[in-house]
Image (cartoon, helix red, strand yellow):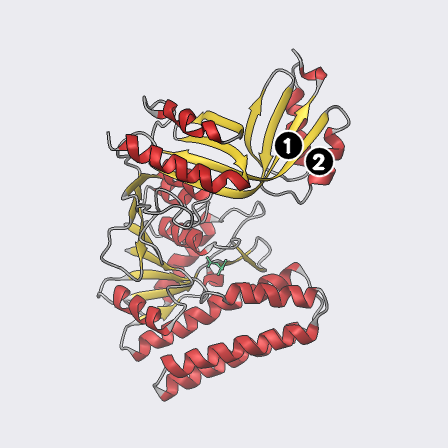
Amino acid sequence: MKVLKFGGTSVGSIENIKCVKDIIADGNKKIVVLSAMSGTTNALVNISDLIKNNNIDEALLDVETLYKNYKLVLEELIEEPNLKKDVENYINTVFDFLKDCTSKKHSELLYNKIVSQGELLSTYFFTKYLHQEGVNAQLLPALDFMRIDKMNEPDDFYIQQNLKRIISEALPADIYITQGFICLNAFGKTANLQRGGSDYTATIIGAAVKAEEVQIWTDIDGMHNNDPRFVENTQAISNLSFDEAAELAYFGAKILHPQTVMPAREANIPVRLKNTMDPKSYGTLISKDFKGEGIKAIAAKDGITAIKIKSARMLLAHGFLKKVFEIFEKHETSIDMITTSEVAVSLTIDDDKNLKAIIEELEKFSTVEVDNQQSIICLVGHSVVRHHETHRLFQVLQDISVRMISYGGSNNNISLLVNTNDKITALKQLNSYVFEFTTA
Ligand code: ASP
């Protein structure tokens, strides 16, 4: 059985919803995971923020605008009167709930419940649309089987047991539809897998049912070898190993949620990235096999903060890094890049929520310098650190000021830290360099 996940744009217009139906209705049994229609989760986050800030009138206006959008989709998509009635009732229930939320006290749970409505709406709509088109589909509510544990990790055993059970209890179907992103937490309350988490849902389900393949359908023909927003003539990469894909997903290649690769790698399930608007294009196949050496892709991640910690006490002393790491751990802030010298250590974080408290503690035994607005540029490829052409990277970068380099942390990744203002130039220069030598 295959698991196919369709992102927000794939279910974001009537035309695309019809494309999705054509892709999945091929007579083969499958599980289909859907995101919310594009724009919906952002709108719901906004409504939640307005409630939090007590802007109730504005929140109600936004609820009303979203309601009207869904009514329009309903008018265009569902013609069959009974199905139309069902969907209309469902929309009304969801929007009555959202209106009701505006009079409630804001909490994390309220936020989680509000943002879960997007996936609940898209899957309900889509299942009814498939019924209208004569496709044998059943809806499997994600909240009946998808759960995370106290560490916010997927509870694999629970998921596997419950998914198996609800499939066996459901009416026989060719296509099982379920919601991406949403889940229960360890206490049985509504939670989620973080923004963009539907990809992760797909590979978690893939591992649970031992799928032959997981397909992630988006609006681009696979993972590109550079960022198409800034660099011209980028190309889709046809094959990536799990390790290469994981590095790229984490360091900025927005097409895939960073944790998506993990369950697939553990269960050795290939992940195929495909384009809903161009289903014939090959896309990118992520598997345990690696093809070719040297740099395969470049990606950039913005919003990075660099912290330099200098201390005379570091010289020839042991335990200094432990002390530094403990402070970051205490403030639940993960470190991405790190480089050291005898008297200083530089590191980067992408979440500066607790930066002030971290600096205060570091300053008790060191001098601290902070640079905001940094970007990590990562170059990914199998054995890239050992490839005989990789040294040329430094010639290309002679015009760009590099704040940090991480080389050899993994064989598949070289990371550079640059000022965000230099990012586009660096991406462009590196791009010409990559194409010069990877064809060799
Ligand atoms: N709808 C959620 C979001 O926008 C999850 C997803 O699309 O993957 O973050």
Q: Position of residue 34 (x, y in %)?
A: 40, 63
Q: Is residue 251 visible?
A: no
Q: Position of residue 307 (x, y in %)?
A: 64, 32
In the rendered structure, which amino acid carries the disc numbered 2?
Ile
Q: Quadrant of the N terminus?
A: bottom left
Q: Position of residue 104 (x, y in %)?
A: 70, 71
- For discs 2 and 1, the disc positioned in front in the rendered view: 1
Query: Could you say whether the residue bearing mark 2 is in a helix, strand or loop?
Result: helix
Chain-order first, disc 2 or disc 1: 1
Q: Given the current orientation, which residue lies at the most extreme top position? A: 316
Q: Quadrant of the C terminus?
A: top left
* Few, some or many residues within 10 Å of mark 2 (<14, 14–19, 20+): some
For disc 2, the marked residue is 358
The answer to whether the residue labelled 2 contacts the one labelled 1, judged by CB atoms less than 8 Å apart, is yes
For disc 1, the marked residue is 307
Is residue 340 shown above or below 328? above
Is residue 365 shown above or below 256? above
355 relative position to 151: left or right? right
In the rendered structure, which amino acid carries the disc numbered 1?
Ile
Query: Could you say whether the residue bearing mark 1 is in a helix, strand or loop?
Result: strand
Residue 425 image-quadrant placement: top left
359 relative position to 395: left or right? right
Q: Given the current orientation, which residue lies at the most extreme bottom position? A: 81
Q: Residue at x 42, y 69 (%)?
A: 123
3D distance between C-alphas at marks 2 and 1: 10 Å
Q: Position of residue 114 (x, y in %)?
A: 58, 67
Q: Is mark 2 within 8 Å of ligand 1?
A: no
Q: Is residue 257 visible?
A: yes
